[in-house]
Image (cartoon, rainbow, N blue to C red):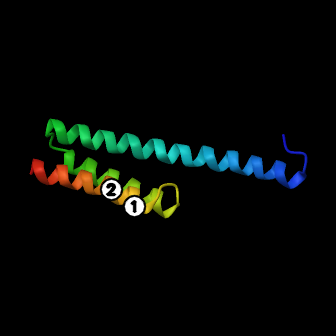
Amino acid sequence: MANIKSAIKKIRVAARNQARRKTVVVAVKKAFKAAEKALVQKTAEAAELVKIACRLIDKAVSNKVIHKKTSARHKSRLAKKLNAVK
């Protein structure tokens, strides 16, 4: 455990940021999986779910929660599957 005051604060801040980022990552994963599931089942709202997932991915990138190349890969995969369904 840290003894220095600034180190203790840094640990608290890191834990708070980690919790905030985790909620964003979980939301992105849920949206991605929901979109993929809709694409596999070829449901009517698949395009809307892909749009929502891409929006969440972009928000995560702008807040620097996930890397922009990771987001590009995920969005590309969703777009590829969406185009295959259409």
**Within 10 angstroms of label 1, few (less than 14), some, or many (20 or more) residues?**
few
- Percent position of residue 79, x then y: 22, 55
Q: Is residue 3 left or right of residue 35?
A: right
Frontmost residue, 68 versus 23: 68
For the point 17% across and 38% down, the residue is: 40
Q: Which mark is residue 30?
A: none
Residue located 90% across and 46% down the image: 3
For the point 53% across and 43% down, the residue is 23
Residue positioned most to the left: 86
Direction from residue 55 to residue 18 in the image, left or right = right
Kind of residue indicated by mark 2? Arg
Q: Is residue 39 above or below residue 72?
A: above
Q: Real-space Cα distance between discs 1 and 2?
A: 6 Å
Give residue 73's mark.
Answer: 2
**Element type at mark 2:** helix
At label 1, the amino acid type is Lys
Task: Name the foreground residue: 73 vs 45.
Answer: 73
Left/right placement of residue 81 relative to residue 10 reads left
Q: Which residue is denoted by mark 1 in the rendering? A: 69
Quarter placement of the N terminus: top right
Q: In the figure, 11 relative to 63: above or below?
A: above
Task: Mark 1 and mark 2 in contact? Answer it, CB < 8 Å.
Answer: yes
User: Is 55 on the left-hand or right-hand side of 2?
Assistant: left
